[in-house]
Image: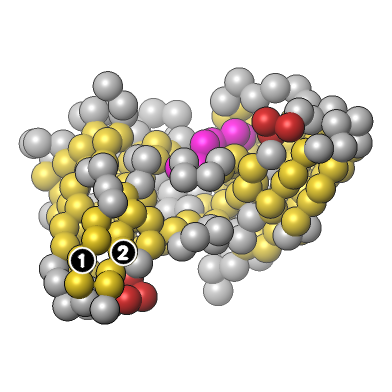
Amino acid sequence: DTEVTQTPKHLVMGMTNKKSLKCEQHMGHRAMYWYKQKAKKPPELMFVYSYEKLSINESVPSRFSPECPNSSLLNLHLHALQPEDSALYLCASSQDPAGGGGETQYFGPGTRLLVL
Amino acid sequence: RKEVEQDPGPFNVPEGATVAFNCTYSNSASQSFFWYRQDCRKEPKLLMSVYSSGNEDGRFTAQLNRASQYISLLIRDSKLSDSATYLCVVNGNTNAGKSTFGDGTTLTVKP
């Protein structure tokens, strides 16, 4: 089973709201990722958690705050977003980010976010 | 120059055609390579991993040329259901966990 789940599927929020995106996997993967994808563009990496520690932050604005409560869960807390943050937010996981084939990433279905 | 460059699309082919996509990468130390497909408004799904000398899965063949730093994807006997965007993904040997995506190549297979 290579399933990554994400909730909610769709989210509409105002610029003053606080919301959270959730991601879950039960494959025993030790790396989890957040990507942002705009229309007709490839996914852009935002954050990587490796063994529940933040290992990569691609200079993402502080209005996005990731959290990894345990090895199966990944959250993305959103606060004071801008309309240009509207996008598809994808979560992915991989067995091990360090290579040896374990870095194959499996994506969740994404959360489609609209900021008004 | 982009780290990963793909053939600019779109590719429009009839059913049954053979189509090939190329992808070049700039980091000679890159370790692993993948092709993903992404349907409209869906998440990327792994199509094939490409290690060492490449591999084949049914109608799909992926090749890796380390000397020239490119990978390719060949689709034989195209089906309507092959219509999608194909993403080339490259992982380097540093900054473990960081994948670099190509911009994608859009394929439309027509009846």
| Dominant SS type (magenta) | strand
Q: Residue at x 26, y 42 (%)?
A: B8
For residue B32, the mark is none
Task: Decide which of A17, A50 is in the foreground and name it.
Answer: A17
Quarter of the rendering containing residue B89: top left
Q: Quadrant of the N terminus of chain A?
A: bottom right
Q: Residue A100's spot in the image, x, y percent? A: 36, 49
The answer for which chain carries disc 2 is B
Q: Residue at x 67, y 31 (%)?
A: A84
Q: Quadrant of the C terminus of chain A?
A: top right
Residue A30 seen from this side: no
* C-alpha span from label 1 to label 2: 6 Å
Task: Decide which of A7, B105 is in the foreground and name it.
Answer: B105
**Boundaries of the magenta span:** A42-47
- The answer to whether B91 appears left or right of A54 in the picture is left
Residue A22 covered by magenta stretch: no
Residue A45 covered by magenta stretch: yes
| Amino acid type at image mark 2 | Thr
Quarter of the rendering containing residue B77: bottom left
Most extreme residue toward the front, as rendered?
Answer: B111
Give the residue number, with chain letter if any, for mark 1.
Answer: B13
Q: Residue A71's spot in the image, x, y percent? A: 69, 51
- Lower sequence index among marks 1 and 2: 1
Q: Residue at x 87, y 37 (%)?
A: A14
Q: Secondary structure at mark 2?
A: strand
Residue B53 seen from this side: yes
Q: Residues within 10 Å of mark 1 (few under 14, many from 20)?
A: some
The answer for which chain carries disc 1 is B
| Amino acid type at image mark 1 | Val
Give the residue number, with chain letter if any, for mark 2.
Answer: B108
Task: Decide which of B37, A58 is in the foreground and name it.
Answer: B37
